[in-house]
Structures are given as C-alpha cells and as structure tokens.
Image: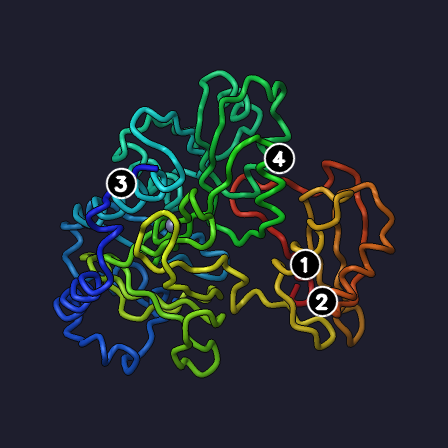
Amino acid sequence: MPIFQPELETMPKPELERLQRERLRERFGVELEALSEQPFRVKSELRDAYPFGLLRVPLEECVRIHASSGTRGKATIVAYTRADLAAWADCCARALAAAGAGPGTVVHNAYGYGLFTGGLGVHYGAERLGCTVVPASGGNTPRQAQLLEDLGAEFLCCTPSYALAIADHISEPARLSLRAGLFGAEPWTEGLREAIERALGLTAVDVYGLSEVMGPGVSAECAEARDGAHVNEDHFLVEVVDPTSGDPLPDGTVGELVFSTLTKEALPLLRYRTGDLASLTREPCACGRTFARMSRILGRTDDMLIIRGVNVFPSEIERVLLAIPELAPHYQLVVERPGHLDELAVQVEGTVEPAPVREQLESALGLTARVEIVPRGSIPRSEGKALRVIDRRTA
Ligand SMILES: [Zn+2]
C-alpha cells in the first residue's frame, strides 16, 4: 500500500532520532537526554490561559482557531499558523493513505465540522492526498446513509459510535461502495471494530489525536498490520509515564501518553499529559514504517470508575459485552449512589437474559453490576462522541 511521505515515515531510526534531537533543541532549548527532567504541561494550564495565553506567535500569524468540547469545564482554545495547518494536513493524509486511500478516493467525512478538530482536520488531509471529499459533517443521520449509497464513498471517517448510528439507517447495503473507514476521537475496542466492519462491510482503522497536541492524525494504524497506531514521530515525541509518579515507563508497559510537539509554531507544548492510557512498541511493522506504535487507548486517567472498590474502565466493560453475540454494540453505564455504596447499571441492547451477562462481567472484571437488557434502538445514538457513562453520583 503506498506510503504518503515514505522519506519521513520509513526514516531509519538513527536519522529520526537526530531529527527529533535537533527539533527539540531548536523549539525548546532542551536536550533529548534531559527531556524526562522537564516539568509536565497539563490541560488545566490551557484552560487557565484561556483564550490565547499560551500562544507563542502573535494572533495575526494564526490562520485557524479550534476549541475542545469543554465537557469537563471551560473550553480550551488552540490555534494554528499556516505551517501548522500544512503539517496537520500531511499527518491526516498519512493516516488516510495508511488506511488505503489515495488520489481520487471518495471520502465521506462525517466528523463534525466547526470548532471540533475532527471535521476540518480530516478534510484538509483528504484534500492534501487528492481524495474527493464529501464534507457531510455530523448530524442528519438518514441523509448520511443516503449520501453513502448515492455518491459511492469508498471511505467513511467519523467516530466509531457514529459509524454504528449511520449503519442503522442504511436501507440497501448492496449499494454501498465502502471499503475502509478511519475512526477515532473516542476510545473503542476490538469488539466494536468487528461490529462496525460487519455492519458496513469495510475495514475499520484507528486514528488518534487530540486538539491540544494537533487534532486527529497524531497517530494512525496501517491497514497492513492494524496493530497499533504509528505516531508521527517527526512531528511529535511520545513518552509513556506512570500516571501517579510521572516516571517514564518502558515500552510494552501501559501508562499515560505524553507528547511533545516538535514542529508546532502557534502552540508548542513540551511534555503534555494527555490522560490517555496506552503502551508503546518500537518493533518493526509489516508496513515498513519505522515510527513507534501506540496500543489502543485502554481508558482515560479521569474516566476510571470505582465501583465498590473495583477499578474498571468503560472500555473493559465494552470488551466483555461485545464478546457476547446476542448483544448489540449499543450500551450505556449508569452509576448511582442510592445509599452509601456505588451501584452500576449496565444497559445494553440485545436478545438475551440479563443473568449470563451479569455473570460474565463478574467473572471477567470482578464487577458487580445490575444488567438491563433493553430493546433495539432504545440507547441514544450519538452524532459525535458517544456518552457511555452517566454518573448520577455528583448530580
Ligand atoms: Zn505499520
């Protein structure tokens, strides 16, 4: 499968390290060896600097503004120079090419356009690659399905949960020309990947990013291996650290992802803590890219549920649910504290009795939960990032 920028994406490791070293010194005046002694940057600093306090160039040199959704407080504003946008488009073009797109591929982009980085990020990457972009944005799901059938899109780009919502509205699967999809912006499991592939008849590929670091395209899987997302290491230095102590962790160990931007002009960040939990591997990949790969996001440091002393991530519950064939990939977790103890209700669509599902959760995760099997269509479908957890403890 063609690589978009082979001279960079397959760069020999010693050359890549030399490039990273130069860029780190040039941007931050920091030596690679001294990186782990540098303080972390965290999301609250971006919020405190609202709106433009962390910009390193005059605002008039920025040609684009985006913002995070602000679901956990005030929005964080990010900005891009012309060069930042060009680098971002390159990274998204790499991601699409790695998933099998090329010049002329019809790409249906159902990520939301607007302040959210998903829509415009993927859009400019697809144009950079020479694809034919359908800028559908999110919303009006029946029309999305109609456009997919009528315009012959080969690629679908959106959140994994929205891909399933669109699949619900496909009236004639035989009319679809889809062959691959680039899905991201929320944690998802292998089980959900299989469900999407079955529902839409395509190969589902994972893309990762966050607005503070850039947006989608910080890393992406290759279609050859689909075994970890290649980090665009010429633009981003990646580390995994212990979420509690902050100490660097070796490859293969799960911890918190930390990124340093090597090329960004408007909003460079040294050692930004993402809150996302994953592990890294630098083993050679079947596709020939030399960039390190990160595992799926196993959870976020701030979305871990503690239910009666058991620590569990929503993605672990998803993994158990989707291994049960009688359950549909639509679920919601409701946490309450009616008395002194937390109670978890797992609501999932399906055609099975609750008891075996409860036993599976108990034996796989040591988790005591009330399981409610609900009829098809009763879990709300999202048009962007799915709301998987409803926490009524703080309400
Ligand atoms: Zn690869």
Residue 114 at x, y = what percent? 38, 40
Which part of the image, by quadrant, shows the N terminus?
Answer: top left
Residue name at image x 14 percent, y 71 percent: 25
1 or 4: mark nearer the eye: 4
Q: Given the image, on which type of amino acid does mark 2 rest?
A: Leu
1 or 3: mark nearer the eye: 3
Q: Is residue 351 above or below residue 390?
A: above
Tag 4 secondary structure? helix
For marks 3 and 2 on the same chain, the one whose residue lies earlier in the sequence: 3
Q: According to the image, label 4 marks what residue?
A: 198
Q: Given the image, on which type of amino acid does mark 1 rest?
A: Ile
When asked about the image quadrant of residue 57, the answer is bottom left
Tag 1 secondary structure? helix
Q: According to the image, label 3 marks what residue?
A: 4
Residue name at image x 78 percent, y 65 percent: 362
Q: CA distance from mark 4 to mark 3?
A: 28 Å
Q: Is residue 263 above or below residue 141?
A: below
